[in-house]
Amino acid sequence: MKSKLYTPGPTKVPGAVLGAVGQQVLHHRSPEFSEKIRHVQDELGRLLETHNDTLIFTCSGTGMMEAAVANLLSRGDKAICLNNGKFGQRWVDICKVYGVDVVDHAVDWGVSIEPAALADLAAKHPDAKAVFVVHSETSTGALHDIEAMSKLLKGHNAVLVVDATSSVGVHEIRMDEWGIDVVVAGTQKALMTPPGLSFVSLNGRAWALVSSSDLPKYYFDFTMTWKRLQKKGQTPFTTAVSLVYGLDVALEMMDTEGWENVYARHARMGAAVRAAVEALGFRVLPAKPVNGLTVALCPPGVDGNQVVRVLDDEFGVRIAGGQDQLSGKAIRIGHMGGIRERDLPTVIGGLERALARIGHKVEPGAGLAALQRVLVGR
Amino acid sequence: MKSKLYTPGPTKVPGAVLGAVGQQVLHHRSPEFSEKIRHVQDELGRLLETHNDTLIFTCSGTGMMEAAVANLLSRGDKAICLNNGKFGQRWVDICKVYGVDVVDHAVDWGVSIEPAALADLAAKHPDAKAVFVVHSETSTGALHDIEAMSKLLKGHNAVLVVDATSSVGVHEIRMDEWGIDVVVAGTQKALMTPPGLSFVSLNGRAWALVSSSDLPKYYFDFTMTWKRLQKKGQTPFTTAVSLVYGLDVALEMMDTEGWENVYARHARMGAAVRAAVEALGFRVLPAKPVNGLTVALCPPGVDGNQVVRVLDDEFGVRIAGGQDQLSGKAIRIGHMGGIRERDLPTVIGGLERALARIGHKVEPGAGLAALQRVLVGR
C-alpha cells in the first residue's frame, strides 16, 4: 500500500496535475512552450498580487533562497536574518557562505518574531541591505506578519526578502500593496506540483540591488533570466517542462476554486487539525500558527519519530517528524494544496490508531470529534 | 497535432518513463525514496563504469557545470577550458563569473580539439587546477576524444572535468579505466527523462580539490550532498522525486536493451542521419561527429530556421536550429534516447517535404534512400 501523503511538502498532487506532468515533453525552445511559461509566470504574479515579473527556475526552494542572496547582495554587505527555525537558519547559512555580514536575530524555535523587533533591528543597522525572513516556517509552523514587517521597512534602506515556500497558496500575499521587495517560493507545497520548480518575484527596488551585486551566479542569474524571458519568452537553460505543465494545471484549479476560497479552506483545515491534535494530548508548538501545516509537540512518553513510522508502515498515512532539535519530540502534519477537508479524518483517524498501537492511551474518536467540531463550525 | 520531438534534448520520452513520472509523488524523506535514489545513483555509476559515488541534483546540465566549478576551484585558480562551441564557451563564462583565471582555448565551431593540443596546454600551464571539456558539443555535433585526453593528463596536476550531457548513453564513458576525474551530465537527452535532473561523479583526486575549494556554494554543495547521502540516503534539499522515478525506468530500459547495444544503435543512427542529410545537400559540420545528434550546414539559399519552422508547423516534426553564430545557417537533429531506427524515416521524410515546401529542389526519397542504405548495411 502506498502511503497517503500528509507531509508538509511535497504534498499530494491532484490527478489532473499528474496527468499534465506525465505527458510527452515539449521542446523548451518551441513557441508553444514559450506561451505556456509566460502564462504560468503571469499566473504566479496574479497569485502574489503583483505587477512585477516572476521568474521560474528548476530547483528546490533552497536554490531560490540562495539565488536571492547571490543576486541581491555584494561581498561584505550587511543583512538581517530573522531566524526562528530551520529555514530561518538556512538564510543565515547561505548568507555566510557568500561572505555576507549577517545580523543573526535568532529566537527559540516556534516563536514568531514581532514586527517591533524588526523595527529595532532596522534602526540599529541602517546600513543593512536586506532583511531575510521566512513567512511560514515549515520546521515549526510559526507564521510571520509579513504585512506589518513590510510596511514598517518602508523608507528603510534594506529590501525585504520573503521565503514563502510553505505559505504561498495558503496565506494571502499582497506583494505590491504591502510593498514586499522579493518573494521566493517552491511549488511543491500548496501549489500542488511535484517538486522541482521554484520562482522569484522582485520589485524595482530589488532590481536596483541586483544591478550592483558582485556575488557570483550563473544558473541562478536573475538578469540573464529576465532578459531571455523578455526577448524570447524562454528560460536561458533547459527548464523542467513537464513540471511547468503541471503547475499550470494546479494554478488553474486553484483559480477556479477562487483564491479567497483557497485561503479560507486552509484556515479551516489549520484550525481543525490543531484542535484535533490538542485533543489527543499534543501541544501545538507556535503561538501564531500557519494554516498549511501543524507542528505539535508530543505528549510525554511519546516518540514522534515512532509515531511517524508506525503511521506510515501500519496505517498507510505519511506525516513528517520534527526536524533537527525537534527530532523525536514533535510531529508535522501537512494540510495544504491537494488536501481537502474531506481528507482530514484519514490522517487524524490514522494518528489515533498509531498512538494506540504504540501504547499511548487516547479515547478513540477524541481527535476526530475535535476535528469535526471545527469543520461543522461549532 | 503535437510535433514529434527530434530535438537534441529534451528528447522524446518513452511512455513507460512518462507513466512513472506521472505517478503520485512520494515524500523525499521516506525510506522508499531513499532506496530508490540510492538505486538510481548506483545505476548511474554503472553507466559511467565507475566505482565513484554519483550525486543527483535538481537542475539542468548547466547548473551541474556551475556546481563543478564552484566545488572544485578556489578564487584565482587557473583552469584550462577547451572551447569549441556554445557549451565549451559556457565553461569559460562560468569560470569567469567565479573569478577563475581562465585559459580559453577557443577554436572554430565544429572543430574537435586534438589531444595533442591539450598536452601542449597542460605543459604550458602546469599550475592549472582543472581542464574543462565538453564530450559531445550539442551546438556543433563535434566529439572530443575523452579517453585520450584523460590518459594524457595522468600525472598532471589538473583534474579533467567532462560535460557529458549529450554523450552519456550515446558514447561509452569508462570513467575509472580512462581516469576521468569528474563527469557532469543532464538526464534529458539520451537518458530519456523529462528535463530537470542532473548528476555528477567525482573520483578521489577531485574530492581532494573539493575539500580545499573556497568558492561559494550551498544548493550545489557536493560535500553536504555526499554526507547526507551516506548518512541517510537522502538529498539535502527536496529532489524532483517524480523525475527520479522516471530516470529509474529509463535506465532499466537501457539496461535491458544492453549498454553495448544502446551505443551500437546510436552509432548506426548517427551514420544513417548523416548520410541522409548529406544526400539532401546539407554538409555535416564536424569532421569528428557525435552519434546522438547531427549538426548540418544548410545548402546555399536555405534558411535553417525556416526549415525548422516549416517542418514543425506543417509536417509535425520538431528539430532544432543552429545556435548563436550558426543561427539560420544550420539545422540540428537529435537522434538519441527514445529515438529508434524505425523513427528516422519520419524526420528525414519530413525534412524532404519541408525543403520542397520552401522551394529547395530535392529528389523525393533521396535522403530516405541514403538513410536506408546505412540502416540495411550496404
Image: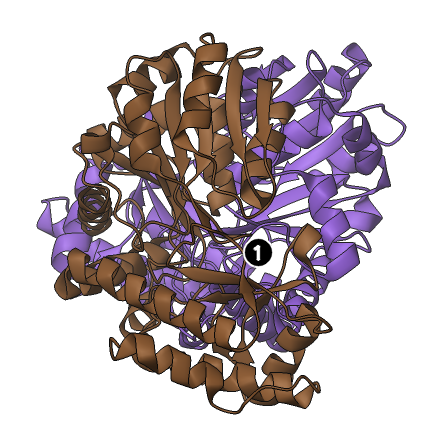
Chain colours: A brown, B purple
> Does residue A348 sit above or below A56 in this rendering?
below
Whether residue A52 is visible here, answered yes or no, is: no
Residue bearing the label numbered 1: B170
Q: Residue at x 68, y 62 (%)?
A: A329
In the displayed image of the protein, which residue is found farthest to the front? A378
Q: Note whether A313 is above or below B63 in the view shown.
A: below
Disc 1 crowd, CA 10 A, few/some/many (<14, 14-19, 20+)? many
Residue under the point 55% across and 85% down: A352
Left or right, B315 with reference to A196: left
Q: Position of residue B271 (x, y in %)?
A: 48, 55
Disc 1 marks which amino acid? Val
* Residue B254 locus on image (x, y percent): 58, 70
The residue lying toward the viewer, choosing from B288 and B186, is B186
Q: In the picture, residue B255 is in which quadrant?
A: bottom right
Camera-side residue: A110 or A311? A110
**Mark 1, chain letter?**
B
Which quadrant, please, contains the C terminus of chain A? Answer: bottom left
Q: Nearer the viewer, residue A211 or A118?
A: A118
Compared to residue B173, the image places residue A377 above or below, namely below
Whether residue B34 is visible, yes or no, is yes
Q: Residue at x 28, y 49 (%)?
A: B280
Q: Residue furthest bottom?
A: A364
Above or below residue B113? Residue B227 is below
Which image quadrant is residue B184 in?
Answer: top right
In the figure, is residue A234 to the left or right of B264?
left
Q: Position of residue B224 (x, y in %)?
A: 71, 43
Image quadrant containing the N terminus of chain A? bottom right
| Residue in view at x 41 percent, y 26 percent | A116
